[in-house]
Amino acid sequence: MKQFKKSTYVKISIVIVLASLFSLKPVKEMLFMLSMINVDAIKGYILSFGVWAPVISFTLMILQSVVAPLPAFIITFANAGLFGWVNGALLSWSSAMVGAVLCFFIARILGRDTVEKLTGKFALKSIDDFFEKHGKYAILIARLLPFISFDIVSYASGLTSMSFWSFFIATGIGQLPATIVYSYVGGMLTSGVKMMVFGLLTLFSLSILMLLLKKIYKQKNKKVMY
């Protein structure tokens, strides 16, 4: 009974903290900036904070992770343009990892009902099917593909029985290539060209996905044969 009460209090406390954060004016302003999906607007907003710019960028990435399904690559492009592609990549990757961890534990502690309210029932169900189909490869594949929501994957992972470290390592490895590529592209190109390159990168990611799925299919067939 005491354990149940303790667990309930923890859940209620987390919900109150999240609700309080999202009601704050600065947080609402950040969410509005993210919803614009405009690299130049995000860059201007981050830069307006002067020496605090990296902290604001870090916070924006965490917010986009928790509030699905806002696009992370916009912030990655902005970071590369402001801080250089190497420093921008480090900032984007580390903040995305923190956001992923938060999503994982929010899901693990608060459960499916809360996650459905944050992500949408249909979106979460589609990721559930993806996890069921691809098993241990699911997180790695999802992190390599820009059109699969980063945050929903993190939430869905927290609802499974997988260990935190399995999730953390797969996320870190899978997220790194995309972060490096987007940062390198974002540091060199103008906004209009960036969107075109993003389209090309999406096609490239689809090609990677097809190769991975083919490999997984072959491995499963070998197991069935033996």
Image: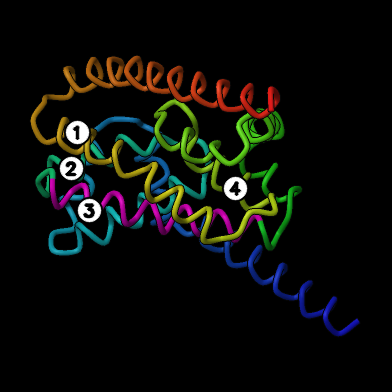
* Mark toward the start of the polypeptide (3 vs 4): 3
Q: Please report whichever mark, 1 or 4, sits nearer to the chain's N-terminal start.
A: 1
**Left or right for 111, reference 152:** right
The residue carrying pointer 4 sits among few (fewer than 14), some (14 to 19) or many (20 or more) residues within 10 Å by Cα, namely many
Instruction: List the residue tagged with mark 3.
Output: 90
Left or right of 65? Residue 221 is right
Contact, CB < 8 Å: mark 4 with mark 2? no
Q: Is residue 163 above or below residue 118?
A: below
Image spot of residue 76 (x, y percent): 26, 41
Residue at the outermost bottom position: 2
Q: For mark 4, what is the residue?
A: 155
User: For residue 121, what is the image quadrant?
Assistant: top right
What amino acid is at disc 2?
Answer: Gly
Which residue matches tag 1? 40
| Disc 1 from disc 2: Cα separation | 6 Å
Extent of the magenta region: 86-107
Q: Nearer the viewer, mark 1 or mark 3?
A: 3
Residue 49 position by quadrant: bottom left
Q: Could you tell me which quadrant the N terminus lies in?
A: bottom right
Mark 1 vs mark 4: give the one in front: 4
Please name the residue that numbered disc 2 is placed on. 44
